[in-house]
Image (spheres, grey):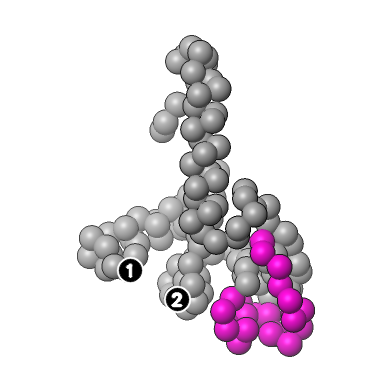
Amino acid sequence: PTLGAHDHGELTEQIQALLREGASAGLHLVLTGDRQLLLGRLASLTEEKYALRLADRADYSLVGIPPRSLPTHIPPGRAFRAESGTATQFALLDAPPEGRAQTAALTAIGAATTARDKAVPAARRPFRL
């Protein structure tokens, strides 16, 4: 199911509320998605947008970047800031750039950190809000 279809749109409403009100409390969100994220209401609530490699080069125009201004080859992790087209590089956690590989790498980092910090007293550990 899509984000909007999940729980009759309740999750989408909660994300929109966080985008509208979160910055005043120091909360910033990072959202990822396909072209649908660039077209919907969530797009109008985001202050900064970065476009990673898109399947259809024409979709860069959705964030104000002329597709012809971009290089032919866009390496994994390379993103372009909306409107200005300024290039930036996001770090990858593992060599394969696909989402599953990045998720697996993050899971492994979490497991290694948990094992490493097992002896740290609970009072000194980060806590969930």
Could you tell me if residue 98 is visible in this image?
yes
Question: Where 122 sits versus 21, above or below?
Answer: above
- Report if residue 5 lies within the magenta region: no
Residue 5 in percent (x, y) is at: 27, 68
* Residue in the image at 51% along x and 62% along y: 32
Q: Which quadrant of the view contains residue 61?
A: bottom right
> How crowded is the residue under tag 2: few (<14 C-alpha within 10 Å), some, or many (20+)?
few
Q: Quadrant of residue 26?
A: top right
Callout 2–callout 1 Cβ contact below 8 Å? yes
Please give the name of the residue rendered at 62% of the width and 68% of the height, measured from the top-left corner: 52
Residue located 67% across and 64% down the image: 76
Badge 1: residue crowd in 10 Å (few <14, some 14–19, many ≥20): few
Task: Give left or right: position of 72 versus 121.
Answer: right
- Of the 4 image quadrants, the one containing the C terminus is top left
The foreground one among 115 and 14 is: 115
Magenta part of the protein: which range?
54-77
> Which quarter of the figure is the N terminus placed in?
bottom left
Q: Residue under circle 1?
A: 2
For disc 2, the marked residue is 36
Q: Secondary structure at mark 1?
A: loop
Residue 63 in the magenta stretch? The answer is yes
Three-letter amino acid code at disc 1? Thr
Numbered disc 2: secondary structure:
helix
**Which comes sooner in the sequence, label 2 or label 1?**
1
